[in-house]
Amino acid sequence: MARTRDESSPLFAGNAAGTLRLIVYLALAVVLMVLDHRNGWLWRLRYAASAVVEPVYRLAGLPAAGIRTVSVAFADRQRLTEQNQRLREDLLLANAKLNRMAAVAEQNQRLKELLDTQHSLELNVQLARVIGVDLGAYRYELTLNMGARDGVKPGQPVIDAHGVMGQVKEVLPTTSVVMLITDPAHAIPVVIERTGLRTMAYGSRDGDQLSLPTIPLAADVRAGDKLLTSGLGGRFPPGFPVGEIRSVAPAATGMFLVAIARPSADLDRSEDVLLLHDLAEPDGPPAPVTPMGPPAGLAPAGAASAAAPATGGAPR
Amino acid sequence: MNRQRLSLWWFVGTLVFALLSMLVPLPGVLEPFKPYWPALVLLYWSLESEDRVTLGLAFSVGLAADLLNGMVLGEQALRLCALAFIALRFRSRLRFFPMWQQALAVLALLLNDRILLLIVRVLAGASLPPASWWISPFVGAALWPFLFLLLDDLRARLRIQ
């Protein structure tokens, strides 16, 4: 290194200019942060630079995917057999339940047709895979390998086999970011299955818990109670499992009960997730009720055929 | 000429690799132990090759990091700028510290970095992180001697500056 040491003092070289430049850069950074916080530029910029950003995400996801592959390749036979057995049993059980449900669903469908409503029990879902990328949000986010090009929209609920995981927060052309229900900034309206009490479940700072800080003191809530989505607010459709209450204690203020719940979804283990396409009713007042006519069976032929395709749960 | 180009590629390559390592997730238990790689690599280069590392470079590396994983644009630019400034200011002294002292200095720099991040996040309205969030600077400082020796050794082998 042939460096010329002609500065007056090499220990404090370029002091004034350095400090001035530091201040300029820091001010620039602060201005950027404030503007971004106000306007949300970051995601627009990410969207614009997606040609660069997304391959980097895929690249960074490779080690996690590689470890998964290696662990499958080297997993011992017995464990795989056990897992296979367990999955088979689960499938059998699920199928049995489904068969029983099918009859009920059929009946429900018929009754609903009789009432001429257009809701259906069918789920319109899309399978997505989790990309292992650390987005700096401390385990409150997931990255999926589906994006705007696959029809993903912000706000779509994300579930796995066991329950609600979260909702899509940001969408890039071929990837999307999911905000988990355990994010401290997330809240989900829930109903307690046993008693029908409606309340809110917030994320918590510890990362793998939900907290329900506003349960009335007189309410009947116990550890072990199951939480379902209530469907209020219109973001999450009703009836999906959210979590199970672990403990209930009076709040520090003494005005409410605070419950801690464990999410039912495998938030940190799921590799495949389902994106729900049937959004529940949008925010705001409900759409005006269509004028009541006679039930579909009794309606004139033209009206019945017009209502028929809508009952199939078409995507929006 | 070729040697110069190689050394430039090596310089850029290490920085890109640091950004990539920042994105790679660790299994849940180890997550809080992940050091802030871009800061460590940038520190190495600011100690070893002063004429390449400027505040502008630190700012652009930070912007790239923000673009890849960030809560707000400019956050990591701010942190890396502050880090590079302190490192460049005390460069001549830091270089001649024995390794353990250097590691302590790195610890102080990384802790300062975390405090800056905390201030930014709290001002942006995020909640306070859990206690395990403070482990990362210590891991970074513990890894520093190894990272330094490894990068120095590789540089000597490639015979580049």
Image (cartoon, coloured by chain):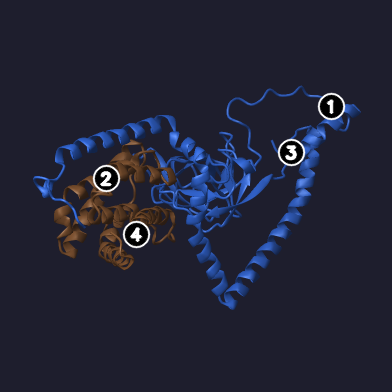
Chain colours: A blue, B brown
In whole angstroms, how far apart are the C-alphas of marks 4 and 1?
85 Å
A17 is higher (above) or lower (below) than B6: above
Query: Does the image show residue A252?
Result: no
- Mark 1 — residue? A294
**CB atoms of marks 3 and 1 within 8 Å:** no
At label 4, the amino acid type is Arg
- Judge depth for marks 2 and 4 and give the one in front: 4
> What SS does tag 2 mark?
loop
Kindly check if marks 2 and 3 are in contact, taking CB atoms under 8 A apart as contact: no
**Pointers 3 and 4 within a single chain:** no
Identify the disc placed on residue B54.
Answer: 2
Verify CB contact (< 8 Å) between mark 4 and mark 1.
no
Question: Left or right: B120 with respect to A203?
Answer: left
Disc number lying in front (2 or 3): 2
State which chain disc 2 sits on. B
Seen in the image, is A29 located left or right of residue A189? left
Q: Amino acid at mark 3?
A: Ala
> Which label's residue is closer to the chain start, 2 or 4?
4
How many angstroms separate mark 2 from mark 4 (CA)?
Answer: 22 Å
Q: Sequence order check: which comes first, mark 3 or mark 1?
A: 1
**Mark in front: 3 vs 4:** 4
From the viewer's perspective, tell me whether residue B26 is left or right of residue A110. left
Marks 2 and 4: same chain?
yes
Residue placed under numbered mark 3 in the picture:
A314
Q: Residue A288 placed where, x, y %? A: 68, 22
